[in-house]
């Protein structure tokens, strides 16, 4: 394989970091005081948009009562939130490892640490939102939870920030839709609103890091990051809905999982969530033809 290097970049990351630091100072939330965690839970409000749920439009969905569908929506959003929390823990470890040799006096490190602080608050917010609904924090299936221990050590450089971008942007697309939906629980909508506002900065930073760190890579190095990015994003996307949620309404988890993966409505939702980040990855050579099978398996690519 050719060792040809991608063009170097002379872009200074500190200028963007300074701008993001100022934005963080101007507009950030504290979920401890900005969300009323003691607010009542309206029984007729959904945990998430029903049309975006994994079983929507299937015979299993048709067999549920309205009350069961609303109950399932609380468990499904708890699964997504707990998987988001799990990935944010991995994200923070990847970022802190990346900062180990960075300049502690520079704006780049200062903003990255600010982002880690944001993610600490977001993880707490997701945990409290699950507790507020009174449902389990499902997290990813056990096998993927264990794989996360491996991925946090091997995913680094541009594939780390590409994976961060995909995980953040698929949830951003979904939450922008959710936070405007008055059928959804008020606390859930506020959680989404806070996350959307603050993650906009994180996604800007991740895109810049991908572009900057891709520069100077050989073809062999690029291939490695293409493979790692695809595998990491497959793991995250397929973990969002833990099959155990289906037990909450009397559905066998294996049957629910099989139905969800074959559900055209759910597959369309996942592709809608993945449209923006995957377009970015493709434009930066991180979604090549030889990895499309993995991306299709993630459901983010049709």
Image (cartoon, rainbow, N blue to C red):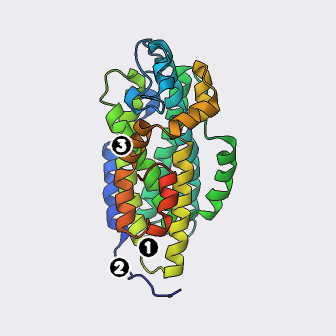
Q: Say whether disc 1 or disc 3 marks the residue closer to the N-terminus.
A: 3
Mark 1–mark 3 Cα distance, whole angstroms, equals 25 Å
SS of the residue at dot 1? helix
In the image, 187 versus 55, the foreground residue is: 55
Between 235 and 26, the one nearer to me in the picture: 235
Q: Is residue 238 above or below residue 43?
A: below
- Provide the secondary structure element on which disc 2 rests: loop
Residue 236 appears anywhere in the view: yes
In whole angstroms, how far apart are the C-alphas of marks 2 and 1?
Answer: 12 Å
User: Which residue is depicted at the point 60% across and 34% down?
Assistant: 243
Mark 3: few/some/many CA within 10 Å (<14, 14-19, 20+): some
289, 171: nearer the viewer: 289
Residue that badge 3 annotates: 173
Residue 10's disc is: 2
Disc 3 and disc 2: Cα gap in Å? Answer: 32 Å
Q: Are marks 2 and 1 in contact (CB under 8 Å)?
A: no
Residue for point 51% across, 30% down: 76
Rendered position, 278 above or below 237: below
User: Residue 257 location, x and y as percent?
Assistant: 58, 36
- Mark number, residue 214: 1
Q: Residues within 10 Å of mark 2 (few under 14, many from 20)?
A: few
Q: Residue at x 55, y 40 (%)?
A: 83
Which comes before the other along the chain, label 2 or label 1? Answer: 2
Q: Position of residue 62 (x, y in %)?
A: 46, 20
């Amino acid at each position: 394989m050719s060792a040809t290097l991608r063009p170097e970049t002379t872009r200074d990351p500190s200028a963007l970091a300074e701008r993001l630091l100022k934005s963080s100072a101007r507009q950030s939330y504290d979920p401890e005081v900005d969300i009323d965690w003691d607010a009542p839970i309206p029984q007729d409000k959904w945990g998430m948009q029903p049309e975006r749920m994994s079983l929507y439009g299937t015979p299993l969905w048709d067999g549920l009562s309205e009350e069961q569908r609303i109950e399932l929506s609380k468990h499904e959003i708890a699964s997504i939130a707990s998987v988001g929390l799990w990935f944010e823990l991995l994200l923070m470890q990847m970022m802190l490892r990346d900062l180990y040799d960075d300049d502690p006096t520079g704006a780049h490190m200062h903003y990255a640490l600010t982002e880690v602080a944001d993610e600490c608050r977001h993880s707490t917010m997701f945990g409290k939102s699950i507790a507020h609904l009174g449902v389990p924090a499902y997290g990813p299936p056990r096998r993927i939870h264990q794989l996360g221990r491996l991925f946090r050590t091997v995913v680094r450089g541009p594939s780390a920030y590409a994976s961060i971008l995909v995980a953040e942007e698929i949830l951003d697309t979904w939450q922008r839709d959710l936070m405007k939906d008055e059928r959804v629980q008020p606390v859930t909508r506020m959680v989404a609103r806070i996350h959307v506002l603050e993650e906009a900065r994180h996604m800007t930073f991740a895109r810049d890091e991908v572009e900057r760190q891709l520069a100077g890579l050989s073809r062999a190095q690029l291939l490695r990051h293409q493979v790692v990015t695809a595998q990491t994003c497959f793991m995250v996307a397929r973990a969002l809905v833990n099959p155990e949620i289906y037990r909450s309404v009397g559905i066998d988890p294996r049957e629910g999982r099989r139905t969800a993966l074959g559900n055209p409505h759910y597959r369309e939702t996942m592709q809608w969530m993945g449209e923006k980040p995957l377009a970015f990855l493709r434009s930066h050579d991180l979604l090549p033809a030889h990895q499309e099978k993995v991306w299709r398996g993630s459901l983010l690519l049709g």
